[in-house]
Image (tube, rainbow, N blue to C red):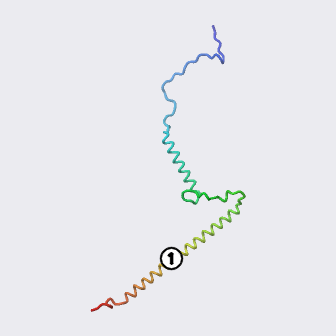
Amino acid sequence: MRKIYDFQNLPPSDPEMNDGELVVEIGSYIPAKQQIESFIQSGKNLQASRQGRYDFEGEVDEDFTDPTRSPGFDMADASQLLLQAEANISEARKIAEASTKAEKASKEESRSKASAADAGDASKPADAGAVV
């Protein structure tokens, strides 16, 4: 007698024979500890990269606000802030240069006084106060 097969009554199938060959890749397995260490290092690198965008050392100040992110900020305002910052920096440099020049002048003056005092001592005879 013939059997009728349909989607509810499927014909018997032969099972797949395993020849023992591995067909999956096992060489790219990364242990969990190594993956976690990699994620931690990636986080540190990301944090260092983000901190490099600011002028702060260590933690970013909580009071820091970026004026360019405020609503209604105009690029003309940014140019005014830039000019003001550059003026402040140049003024600070001038003050620093003036203080270094003053320090150098005071050192030179003290050196010249010391050398003049040494020269005055050299003009006296060595036995001027000696009792013979």
Instruction: Give the residue furthest to the front.
Output: 62
Q: Position of residue 13 (x, y in %)?
A: 58, 18
Question: At x 46% / y 81%, what residue is drawn?
Answer: 110
Instruction: Give the residue furthest to the top.
Output: 1
Question: At x 32% / y 88%, what residue is drawn?
Answer: 126
For the C terminus, give its image quadrant: bottom left
Q: Looking at the picture, does residue 91 appear above or below residue 17?
A: below
Q: Relative to residue 34, is residue 5 drawn left or right?
A: right
Q: Looking at the picture, does residue 31 appear above or below residue 94?
A: above
Q: Relative to residue 122, is residue 91 drawn left or right?
A: right
Q: Position of residue 7 (x, y in %)?
A: 66, 18
Q: Looking at the picture, does residue 81 appear above or below residue 117?
A: above
Between 82 and 20, the residue placed more toward the observer is 82
Q: Amino acid at mark 1?
A: Glu
For the N terminus, give its image quadrant: top right
Q: Residue under circle 1?
A: 103
Q: Position of residue 40 (x, y in %)?
A: 52, 47
Question: At x 53% / y 51%, what residue is drawn?
Answer: 45
Between 86 and 59, the residue placed more toward the observer is 59
Q: Looking at the picture, does residue 47 appear above or below residue 3?
A: below
Question: At x 51% / y 45%, what residue is drawn?
Answer: 38
Between 13 and 9, the residue placed more toward the observer is 9
